[in-house]
Image (cartoon, rainbow, N blue to C red):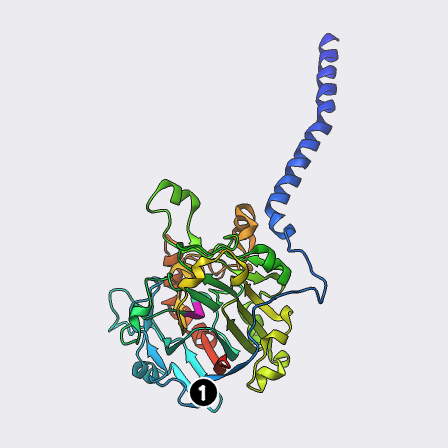
Amino acid sequence: METTRLLGRASAKASDRRPLTWLVATLCLVFAAWCFLAGTLVLPRTHKEGTYTCPGSALDYELAHDFFASDFFSEDQWYYFTHADPTGGPTQYLSHDDALGAGLLRHGDGWAVLQAGRREDPLQQSESPRRQSVRLHSRQAWEHMLIAVSYSHVPHGCGVWPALWLYCDGADVEGQTGADRCGPWPENGEIDLLEFANEFFAKTSLHLGAEPHCTLNATAIEQCGPFYDKNGMRFDCATDYFTGKDSLLSFINGPKYGCAPNRYDTWPTPSQLNAAPGTFVFEWTPDAMKIWNFADADVPADLRAGAPVPGGWDDTKLWSYYPLAWSDCPGKAKLRPLNLVINIAFCGDWAGGDWGRAFDDGWAGRGFLYNAAQVLVGESCASRWGSYGAATPRGACNGFILSDDSDTLVERDAFFNLTGLKVYQVVR
């Protein structure tokens, strides 16, 4: 009887503890879910229409150069970069004549296609096999200008890393004029107008050296619209991908990726860009840098007429805004005239390094737990294509892009089709 009473008391005590146990378990689950989903809860504040203020545009522009006025791919207009891929990928950049012979350059009345190419012939390939591509650098460089790039298709796909960008290239490109005007990258600036890898959302970034510094004014950016720093750098434009090798403090602080104030509600995927072709516009004045993307139906009438007046354009179409004159940015004095670059790379630091990363919008500010969850449940190149027997993401990417599995996809998807490219400068 006494044993029965003791067992009864123990059972009652256990029963009394069950609600508390369930409460603790529920709270733990809620907390874990919050940690994983926290990134989706930290959304930018919305603005009422008509409340945006994005100063910095010039008043009047005139045409300085039209790349379609002559042979688009002429070596008079472009320098063909044929060095090893600086991003570490298996990319074989071809000369003008070799690219023409391989069918990577095609153009007609009002269109120009830059196409990624074949894998090297197995019988002729080097110890490190590569896939053919093209990287163009404009012969001319411009300071304080407006560039309009119209397109009907941009490259995309697993292992593909396309970019449309500007930087001061005289220091590391043979045959370019004014090589003495450029210091080591990124001292004199780089601005990415369009860049993405695999199937990630597009983004734009500004890269400057660490000294003198340049940190954009977050308040001025917020007044222009719902912009986030997509690189997670709090609008610090200093760039050093290799930080961490020199000291413990550098290792703790981590790499610096440059500033990327991208408007949250206009981040597109490559497929979305191709579904609604249009025109990218980059404006650089002494006061600001701005990047727009207009679908064909939304291209401003003055731009279509060849007389752009960007101060009157719809600021909700802005992709990115860099208010240099309203920021703590002595580093802007280091900016030099910039050359336009168009290229398609393979794998390397980004497309290869993020082979296993889910196809999200790329915003770094969501934090480790959210990004870790995306790796587990989101679609990625690794979930589509596997590891190809490689021990690293970069090895898996290289295995895919150098296999016959990628041939059809590269031919179908990895190309630029440009339908306009004009440079305007301020009327003097």
Q: Classify residue 266 by image quadrant.
A: bottom right
Q: Which residue is mark 1?
A: 68
Magenta-drawn segment: 161-166
Is residue 164 magenta-colored?
yes
Q: Amino acid at mark 1?
A: Phe
Pick out the residue farthest to the top. Answer: 2
User: Which secondary structure lies at badge 1?
Assistant: helix
Q: Classify residue 335 by image quadrant.
A: bottom left
Assign the N terminus to one quadrant of the image: top right
Is residue 96 magenta-colored?
no
Task: State the predominant SS element of the stretch in magenta.
Answer: strand
* Picture layout, residue 323 above or below residue 40: below
Give coordinates of residue 54: x percent, y percent.
Answer: 61, 66
Give coordinates of residue 137: x percent, y percent.
Answer: 37, 75
Q: Classify residue 292 by image quadrant.
A: bottom right
Q: Is residue 276 visible?
A: no
Give coordinates of residue 135: x percent, y percent.
Answer: 37, 74
Residue nearest the observer in this picture, 389 or 278: 278
User: Is 418 situated left or right of 8 in this image?
Assistant: left
